[in-house]
Image: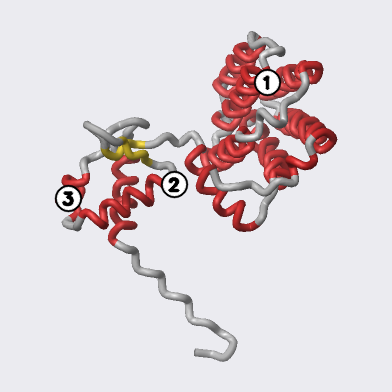
């Protein structure tokens, strides 16, 4: 070996439980199993993979802690397919965020950087599906009273979720949903006052129109301004909350 060069590290060997977890994920994808679908029982997996119960249970634990499956208890219980709505990924991410000391301010800044990109992607999608989905979400949210704080916050969050879903990039959409879900844990503490909520509705209208018109630059600008407005409100009114460490949930 020449001086100054390093041997590439050998890949670590996978544990049996990791191999089983990987195959279960392949099964879910290949068979297009919907969330809530019952997976094979522990005994069936032991027989299929020719392993003991300990390896199967560890595999299920790997998938469960990452939100990819859930374990039902009681009669007829067992592993079921989890949802890919971002909550499982978000929960797993908070372990890393807490360990590095990331704050809610860091999280808000990440959302402000990421979501405008997704808006630009959504506006660049061919056809009318992206615009129609956002328009439907917007119309639903406009029927929610501004005086109903929790429902208003929920409809606002739903609009953003739709924006992610029509971006055309499932990886960025998953990350954005995870960041949104982590933030929503604090939504009751960081609520826009009733007098400011009209600005949220107006921003959502402008975003929807830009995406309907396939104007990527305008969509990106509108989402950035929308989130910067909210970030500035939080900085002015709840700086102590923004300084909190993101904790595992």
Can you identify the residue that label 2 sits on? 66
- Which is more toward the observer, 59 or 4? 59
Point 72% across, 39% down: residue: 112
Point 40% across, 42% down: residue: 68
Point 68% across, 18% down: residue: 149
- Number of numbered discs: 3
Asked if residue 228 shows in the view, the reply is: no
> Would you say 52 lies left or right of 247 here?
left
> What is the x, y in percent for residue 247?
60, 47
> What is the x, y in percent for residue 70?
36, 39
> Would you say 92 lies left or right of 226 here?
left
> Would you say 82 lies left or right of 240 here?
left
Q: What is the C-alpha distance between the residues marked 1 and 2?
A: 33 Å
Rendered image: mark on residue 208? 1
> What is the x, y in percent for residue 167?
58, 33
Can you identify the residue that label 3 sits on? 48
Q: What is the C-alpha distance between the residues marked 2 and 3?
A: 23 Å
- Which is more toward the observer, 83 or 224? 83
Name which quarter of the figure residue 202 lies in. Answer: top right
Q: Secondary structure at mark 1?
A: helix
> What is the x, y in percent for residue 33?
32, 34
Name which quarter of the figure residue 238 lies in. Answer: top right
Q: Is residue 46 above or below residue 33?
A: below
Q: What is the C-alpha distance between the residues marked 3 and 1?
A: 50 Å
Indicate the quadrant containing the C terminus: top left, top right, bottom left or bottom right: top right
Q: Residues within 10 Å of mark 1 (few under 14, many from 20)?
A: many
Asked if residue 247 shows in the view, the reply is: yes
Q: Is residue 46 above or below residue 119?
A: below
């Amino acid at each position: 070996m020449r001086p100054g060069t390093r041997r590439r590290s050998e890949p670590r060997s996978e544990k049996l439980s990791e191999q089983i977890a990987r195959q279960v994920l392949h099964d879910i994808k290949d068979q297009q199993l919907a969330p809530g679908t019952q997976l094979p029982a522990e005994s069936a997996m032991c027989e299929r993979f020719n392993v003991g119960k300990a390896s199967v249970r560890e595999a299920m634990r790997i998938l469960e802690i990452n939100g990819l499956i859930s374990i039902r208890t009681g009669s007829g219980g067992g592993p079921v397919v989890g949802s890919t709505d971002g909550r499982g990924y978000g929960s797993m991410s908070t372990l890393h965020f807490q360990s590095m000391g990331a704050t809610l301010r860091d999280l808000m800044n990440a959302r402000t950087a990421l979501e405008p990109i997704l808006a630009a992607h959504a506006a660049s999608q061919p056809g009318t599906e992206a615009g129609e989905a956002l328009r439907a979400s917007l119309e639903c949210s406009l029927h929610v009273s501004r005086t109903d704080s929790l429902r208003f916050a929920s409809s606002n969050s739903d609009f953003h979720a739709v924006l992610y879903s029509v971006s055309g990039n499932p990886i960025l959409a998953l990350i954005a949903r995870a960041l949104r879900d982590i933030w929503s844990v604090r939504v009751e503490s960081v609520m826009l006052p009733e007098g400011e909520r009209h600005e949220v509705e107006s921003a959502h209208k402008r975003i929807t129109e830009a995406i309907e018109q396939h104007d990527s630059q305008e969509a990106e600008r509108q989402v950035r301004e929308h989130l910067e407005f909210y970030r500035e409100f939080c900085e002015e009114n709840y700086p102590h909350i923004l300084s909190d460490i993101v904790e595992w949930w």
